[in-house]
Image (spheres, coloured by chain):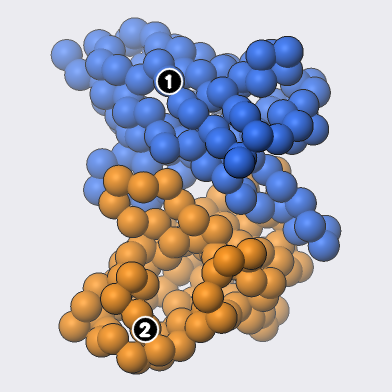
Amino acid sequence: DIQMTQSPSSLSASVGDRVAITCRASQYISSFLNWYQKKPGTPPKLLIYGASTLFSGVPSRFSGSRSGTEFTLTINSLQPEDFATYYCQQSYTTLYSFGQGTKLDIK
Amino acid sequence: QVQLVESGGGVVRPGGSLSLSCTASGFTFRAYAIHWVRQAPGKGLEWVSLISYDGFNKQFADSVKGRFSMSRDNSKDTVYLQLNSLTVEDTAVYYCARDSRASESNYFDSWGQGALVTVSS
């Protein structure tokens, strides 16, 4: 099975900051990597698919990139509504495993 | 609009069984694979299972293999998850999600609101 490892597990930042969250796959997954935002009591929301394609309606301050088996979600100019938990997910195999999550909270 | 609605959650004793349903609307249900994902209290997201658009391909996480099963009725736009031999570790909110595809990538673009399953004596 493919293991997805996110770092950091938690992150504190201020409104207006730029933050980056990293996800590393245990094996080659091409660019089959998705990012989701999760807030308590609500289902996950898709942000980025295919490592770098912004999903419809997602603000352009979110971006994704890939370097080998390492993937990065970057959020520019953090907004109050961005404080949430972020998950990566591989879709290279049909057992679509998730990373353990990165909780982003307000400093 | 695209909508997925889970039902059937509740409280069950260890060793018991429960059935969840996920009913879709707003899209051609029979064209899409559907997944279940769960989140235990205070934990992250865990992929649970998949059923293909036609119901012939089903896959399960190792943590539930042999205990959970999936089926679908495309005439009712509904997917079912049967949970058997439940343990306290199965306590979670269970989400169903639609598997969509674009540019050769698969992703979950629509999710239900979740159904809470509590396993407790």
Residue A65 percent across, percent down from the top left: 63, 81
Tell me residue B38's x, y (percent).
43, 38
**Is the C-beta separation of discs 1 and 2 under 8 Å?**
no
Q: Tag 1's secondary structure? A: strand
**Residue B42 against residue A11 in the figure, above or below:** above
On residue A78, the disc is 2
The disc placed on residue A83 is none
Q: Residues within 10 Å of mark 2 (few under 14, many from 20)?
A: some
Q: Is residue B113 above or below residue A107?
A: above
Q: Tell me what residue is drawn at x 65 percent, y 34 percent.
A: B26
Q: Colour of chain B?
A: blue
Local secondary structure at mark 2: loop
Q: Is residue B49 above or below residue B46?
A: above
At x 22% / y 78%, what residue is drawn? A106
Answer yes or no: are tags 1 and 2 on the same subunit.
no
Which residue does the image show at 71% across and 62% down from the upper left?
Answer: A32
- The disc numbered 2 marks a residue on which chain? A
Residue A46 location (% of width, % of height): 55, 58
Going by the numbered disc 2, the residue's amino acid type is: Leu
When asked about the image quadrant of residue B28, the answer is top right
Which quarter of the rendering shows the N terminus of chain B?
A: top right
Check the image and name the residue furthest to the front.
Answer: B1
Q: Chain ID for label 1?
A: B
| Chain identifier for the orange-coloured part of the image | A
Who is closer to the viewer here, B39 or A6? B39
Residue assigned mark 1: B7
Q: Nearer the viewer, residue B24 or A93?
A: B24
Residue B21: in sight, yes or no? yes
The image shows residue B36, relative to residue A76, as above or below, that is above
Residues packed near mark 1 inside 10 Å, few (<14), some (14 to 19) or many (20 plus): some
